[in-house]
Image (cartoon, rainbow, N blue to C red):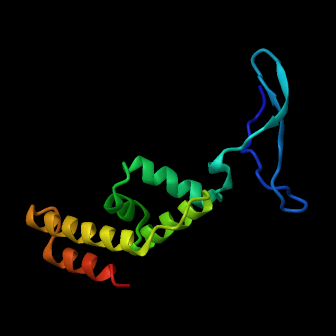
Amino acid sequence: MYEIYPVPSKCPVCGEAMAITRLHCPHCAVSVEGHFAWGRLARLTPEQLNFVEVYLRCDGKMKRVEEELGVSYPTVRNWLNEIIVALGYEAPRPEAAEETTSERRRQVLDDLATGRITSSQAIELLRGENS
């Protein structure tokens, strides 16, 4: 067997998008030639793909993503917005961000009320939303 490398999505010479024109099955040695699509995820940088993996592993829970990556909520939100745009979707509307902030505040207060976080942690999290 041979070593498998990540698929390069950009040309190492000119930086343009690479085209998939051949697929090969290492098990039975069948090859198929044509023009194949990459899919939206191929547009992401390795760092963005890593973030998507962390986000999925954390079930989309922003607090868990924050903890795993050691960054603030606004940073996680900004990275997520950048990925949304990189995938070819519209950037989230400002009112959607306000709704998210309101939901986040509610989550912090709920965490405080149930004893999952301390009051100093709640203050830190709520202040982090304004930075």
Figure label count: 0
Q: Is residue 60 above or below residue 35?
A: below
Q: Nearer the viewer, residue 70 or 45?
A: 45
On-image quarter of the N terminus: top right
Image position, residue 122 (x, y; %): 20, 75
Asked which quadrant contains residue 108, the reply is: bottom left
Residue at x 18% of width, y 79% of height? 120
Residue at x 44% of width, y 73% of height? 75
On-image quarter of the C terminus: bottom left
Q: Is residue 91 above or below residue 123?
A: above
Image position, residue 62 (x, y; %): 35, 61
Judge whether residue 82 can be spotted in this image: yes
Image position, residue 73 (x, y; %): 37, 71
Residue at x 9% of width, y 61% of height? 114
Q: Is residue 21 above or below residue 44?
A: above
Q: Is residue 66 left or right of residue 113?
A: right
Residue at x 15% of width, y 69% of height? 109
Residue found at the very far top of the displayed protein: 28
Asked which quadrant contains residue 11, the reply is: bottom right
